[in-house]
Image (tube, rainbow, N blue to C red):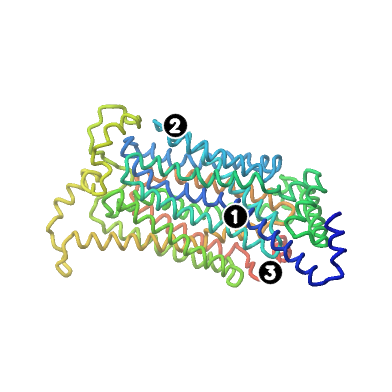
Amino acid sequence: MDRNSETKHLSSDPSETRKLEHQRGTGSIRLVLVAAGAASLSGLMLGYEMGLTSGVLLQLRGLLSLSCREQELLVSSHLLGALLICLAGGHILDRYGRRCSLLLSAALVVGGSILLIVATSLIALTLGRVIVGMGTSLSGTGACLYIAEISPRERRGLLVTLYELMLVVGVMLGFSCSYAFATLPHGWAYTFGLVIPPALLQISVLVFLPPSPRFLVSQGKVEQAKIVLARLRGGVHEHVEKELMDIRTGLKEESEHSFLELFSTKANLRSRLLTGVILVFLQQATGQPNILSYASPLLRSVGFNSDAAATLASTGFGVVKVVGTIPAVLLVDSVGPKRFLCGGAVAMGISLVALGTLTLQSHTNLTSLCKSHSILNHTHAPWDLNETSISLENSDIYSTDLPYQWISEESQQSNREDEGILESAGGRTYGEGSSLLKWASLISLLVFVAAFSISLGPMVYVVISEIFPMGVRGKAVSVVSAVNWATNLLISMTFLTITEKIGVANVMFLYAAMSFVLLVFVIFCIPETKGRTLEEISKELAKK
């Protein structure tokens, strides 16, 4: 009422009216940016938890004398929490709203991280990782929905991709922090604890931000939604009314479709769902989750002989993910996701074949990634972190120069036999040849990570958001996300066990084969969506 009268009073002065509208517009843009930034902290936290895994694993597997199965449990516990909350997350998001769900997820991250810091056993560490996984998974879904629903149409794509950018930055920070604390006593605890500040920052900002207008309309609070939209859009009455009408129309359309329709032949929905499920399965089956989660152990197996060296080398993965994601975000509209997916699949397959070949040429005789021989003679239970830490405070286990003690007995024997032997080509020693293999392996891994970051990383979710009709899109994405987390969990839980059975090189060749299967699937089953409206895409898929 006051705003209308103020505008009417200033209508005789066009310059004052324009100035007032500019101030309102600037204020609304700032509010949207603050809200999107606060929600995007969820991506930072998820990426950070993904990035820290491999470096922390190297520290804890020696302190706790973890077997392959126990290492897989520690790594996959985060994914188990993500899968559990994914199954119930849709109900939480719809019942309590996006903003409240983000507050709950940040609280879970804080609580789980505190448990990880004070943990004294493998069981406590696993439980803490499950809780943190629940928090980061729920916040990831809630953040993308919240950003999309508060953003103006012309800036929605840019602001939603802010989440993806924050995620890869988080991965880089996770690798970097695990390296920074690798040589400190209890460095793993500091690494786990650094996710708490962004979680607390997110909570402190979100309590002052408005709920999603779409959620308010779904709860029947139309007038409150109109007030929130006015704040977010600068108070332009026509824009607010039109957007409010679009929200109500979209919600009505969604309510007309049931969950079971996804599995029917209506509009070819079952085939579309199968396409999305296979795409996310192949995304995980190409090995990217394991390359990140087991990056440091993998690099140790190819010649980086200390924890610190392997963790530092793996930090390059985080940098490459950031650099690779930027062109994908900028060029997706002009190039199209299908071309990105095809190019990425080829590059990933070639790099994995190269990595497998280099591993076969290695003289380390390592067939697994999980063997870690501690330099200490433990006289206590291997799962007690308190007792371990007392005896480690003044020991050399935190030294960055531990190549001999941490490799297997077979590797030590092989190294002793190979010392001084000259290579037939050029008279190089084995050490020089091993060094070349080590750096070539690192380059192959970096190419693989870059290819994934520019293709499968962002493009899979672009395709999934485009192949389903509006009325069932939310339900379909929730099913595909659950399959995504479940596949990630299964692959991560069995990775070390499979390398024990068939060796690292054969695992890389298996991932390469899956990359070429992905290429064939994309060529024949994924539609070209560049330059087409969602309605055009949906009509074509409904006929096939």
Which of the image's four quarters has the N terminus? bottom right
Nearer-N-terminus badge (2/3): 2
Spatial distance from mark 1 to mark 3, Cα to Cα? Answer: 30 Å
Residue at image mark 1: 37
Spatial distance from mark 2 to mark 3, Cα to Cα? Answer: 50 Å
Looking at the picture, how far across and down is residue 391, in whole percent?
A: 26, 32
Mark 1–mark 3 CB contact (< 8 Å): no
* Rendered position, 166 above or below 381: below
Nearer-N-terminus badge (2/1): 1
Residue at image mark 2: 124
Q: Amino acid at mark 2?
A: Ala
Farthest top residue in view? 380
Q: Amino acid at mark 3?
A: Arg
Mark 2 closeness class: few <14, some 14–19, many ≥20 residues within 10 Å: some
Q: Inspect this view and state whether residue 319 appears.
A: yes
Residue at image mark 3: 532
Looking at the picture, how far across and down is residue 158, in whole percent?
A: 62, 63
Spatial distance from mark 2 to mark 1, Cα to Cα? Answer: 32 Å
Asked which secondary structure carries label 3, the reply is loop
Nearer-N-terminus badge (1/3): 1
Asked which secondary structure carries label 2, the reply is helix
Mark 2–mark 3 CB contact (< 8 Å): no
Q: Amino acid at mark 1?
A: Gly
Quarter of the figure with residue 194 = top left
Determine the residue positioned at 23% across, 47% down. 402
From the image, state whether disc 1 or disc 3 is nearer to you: 1
